[in-house]
Amino acid sequence: MNVKNKNEIFTEVVLEIFKVGGLLNIEGDKMTNEFGLTASRWKILGAIELSDTPLTISEIGRVMGQSRQAVQRLVDLMTKDKLLQQVENPNHKRAKFVQLTPQAKNIYLQLDKKQIQWAEGLSMDIKKSDLETTREVLKKISDLIDV
Amino acid sequence: MNVKNKNEIFTEVVLEIFKVGGLLNIEGDKMTNEFGLTASRWKILGAIELSDTPLTISEIGRVMGQSRQAVQRLVDLMTKDKLLQQVENPNHKRAKFVQLTPQAKNIYLQLDKKQIQWAEGLSMDIKKSDLETTREVLKKISDLIDV
DNA sequence: GATAGTTTGTCAACATGTTGTCAATGTTAA
DNA sequence: TTAACATTGACAACATGTTGACAAACTATC
């Protein structure tokens, strides 16, 4: 019946993560194209909007599991594009808080609607409990690596 | 209890895929460093070794869910490094088959051992059935996008 | 066989990401 | 307070990836 051991399945999961990640990026690029955005820039907006507290550039990087330098680069570009603005951080002179401009909030809301419709189509055939299991497994893996 | 709907969970899964993907790449780079490889080049070796039939560059791309150009670039570099060699494909004059050199096979075997130990540590706290669910969910997503 | 459409290799432009380094800023401990 | 350590912004080098375009090679259809 089931001839594969746990390690083999784990390896398959890892390879599938790479594959799906790439495909999702392409999909995200298409989805954001009409707003002059890309998948990566959309993710930055999401990281800020989904957070309960104001975030600095380094904090955004930590939330996304990325280097602060990669985030800095995008934030600089998006600031130039009037999508982000930086405000004083009372706790740190250099590390300012990053905020969405009204224009970016507007775009983000539209993208959120678009994404929900897209997600509904994709997750139609997937059980909610299976999605939850997947989320937990991925979180466990990321926590275990991140040490 | 559970206030999140399916779309929200789906979104969390997507964000976790991005995060874990990045972390796995960093981990793969560290793991392959002693052999003068990178995570991406290791993946190329894996795609070829795990296939039942000889693969062309374009086919490797399709298996990995990547553009053939990205694969081509790496195969060219790895050919220069004596890790890959190309042999005639009776079905196509230009699209040759890509093979591992003995040296690459040797490295791949060592990496496989190393990876199994690493995977055992990581998947220790994860149920086999949950890993299988995760794999199936990811496959479903990638199939649905790939159309 | 000729023709139209697809796949492939090649080259180029560009976006994204890690890593390393340095000085400026914050934090901690003696 | 001061000295050691950690975090941050800034810059640079490099690896990886998508996309677009073009000609060569293959496939299918008439």
Image (cartoon, coloured by chain):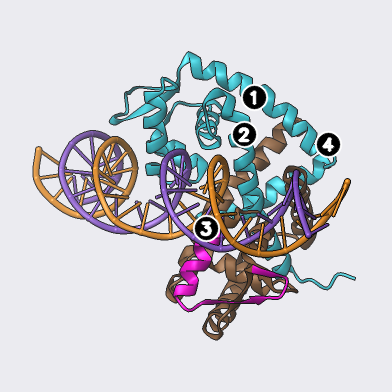
Chain colours: A brown, B cyan, C orange, D purple
Question: In the rendered structure, which amino acid carries the disc numbered 1?
Answer: Asp
Against A81, residue A5 (above or below) is: above
> What residue is disc 2 on?
B30
Give the CA separation, mark 3 to mark 2. 24 Å
Question: Mark 3 near mark 2, Cβ–Cβ under 8 Å?
Answer: no
User: Going by the image, does B128 lie left or right of A18?
Assistant: right
Question: Mark 1 near mark 4, Cβ–Cβ under 8 Å?
Answer: no
Which region shows up in magenta? A70-93
Which residue in the rendered view is the most extreme toward the top? B102
- Label 3, secondary structure: give it: helix
Q: Which chain carries label 3?
A: A
Against B114, residue A125 (above or below) is: below
- Label 1, secondary structure: give it: helix
Q: Which residue is drawn at 66% across and 54% down?
A: A65
Question: In the rendered structure, which amino acid carries the disc numbered 4?
Answer: Met
Q: Which residue is drawn at 68% across and 29% down?
A: B115
Quarter of the image for residue A66 reads bottom right
Give the CA separation, mark 2 to mark 1. 14 Å
Residue A146, image x, y percentages: 73, 46
> What residue is disc 3 on?
A25
Q: Nearer the viewer, mark 3 or mark 2?
A: 2
User: Going by the image, does C18 lie left or right of B125?
Assistant: left
